[in-house]
Image (tube, rainbow, N blue to C red):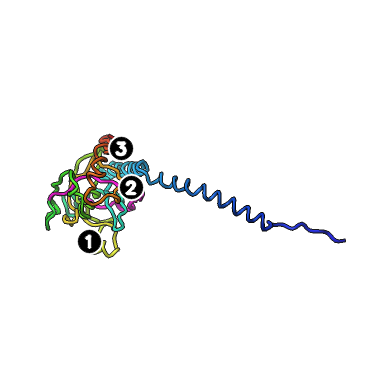
Amino acid sequence: MNVKRKKRGFSLPETIVVMGVIGLLAGIGVPAVKGVLASFESSDRVRDVIGAALSSGRAIAIKEQKYAGVRFQRDLAGDQYMIFIVHDQAATDLAYGFRSVIGRNPVRLPRGGGVMDLRLRTKTGSGEAQYPDDEPIASDGQIDSDEELRDTTTFSVVFSPSGKLVTHEVRVRGTGGGVFGDSTVVDAGNAMFYHDYYPAMGLGQEPSRNRFVVFNRSKFSDQPFTSRWTGYLGGLQTAKEVYINPYNGQLISR
């Protein structure tokens, strides 16, 4: 007795229809996915990541009963990282020496954004890494070089052993953590960050901060070197400067 078996699968017309539907859904979905990804790169996302890091830095200060906090610095690719640091004069051989915290990896900020303290060192000569003098950026000429950009994107936020936000001189060395290095080591790709030994590069001792601005990397990159301040950063400082609550470390918008 012959039994007819039903054929399974799609015919060519059905396959074409299915592929057309998939293509249509992809066309609708991709922009939505891009929108979701862009939201993760927004200033709010950057703030959330920073807020979590500051809470961790404050907790380290309280637990270790030492001055501790978070260091912001860009890598060679231009991505900005947060490194957990703790005061350790014995290990760094510096009165204001901070080292990276052992066991705490750097945290990368969302690539769409970054932070600046909008201040620059005023002494950049050889051997002047110990001088903390600095001034606020107020003109295009103060933010038109790579060294000045590195300076204003490199700063620290420090908490006291009681967990209170403080202004403390900071000079970072990599003892114990291995994420900082000499310029030749970093330039060779063998370390992510520089020591505070290079004032001409914008890297030296300076006071910790209690405020900063969050900037959009694309908008900043679109600005000519000659109008970074007047075309973008000056407006951010006026309208969107972020403060840190001195008692709990939480972020407060102006």
Query: Given the image, on which type of amino acid does mark 3 rest?
Result: Leu
Give me the residue at 34% from left, 44% from top: 46
Q: Determine if residue 223 is in view.
A: yes
Q: Quick one: label 1 or label 2, which is nearer the N terminus?
A: 2
Give me the residue at 63% from left, 53% from top: 17
Residue pointed to by mark 1: 183
Give me the residue at 24% from left, 37% from top: 238
Q: Residues within 10 Å of mark 3 (few under 14, many from 20)?
A: some
Q: Quick one: label 3 or label 2, which is nearer the N terminus?
A: 2
Question: Considering depth in this image, is 249 or 103 the residue closer to the camera?
Answer: 249
Quadrant for the C terminus in the image:
top left
Q: Distance between the Cα atoms at labels 1 and 2?
A: 25 Å
In the image, the segment drawn in magenta is 98-122
Query: Given the image, on which type of amino acid does mark 2 rest?
Result: Gly
Coordinates of residue 84 in the picture (x, y in percent): 29, 49
Q: Distance between the Cα atoms at labels 3 and 1?
A: 33 Å
Do the CB atoms of the residues marked 3 and 2 lie less than 8 Å apart? Answer: no
Q: Determine if residue 67 is in view.
A: no
Q: Residues within 10 Å of mark 1 (few under 14, many from 20)?
A: some
Residue pointed to by mark 2: 113
Q: Quick one: label 3 or label 1, which is nearer the N terminus?
A: 1
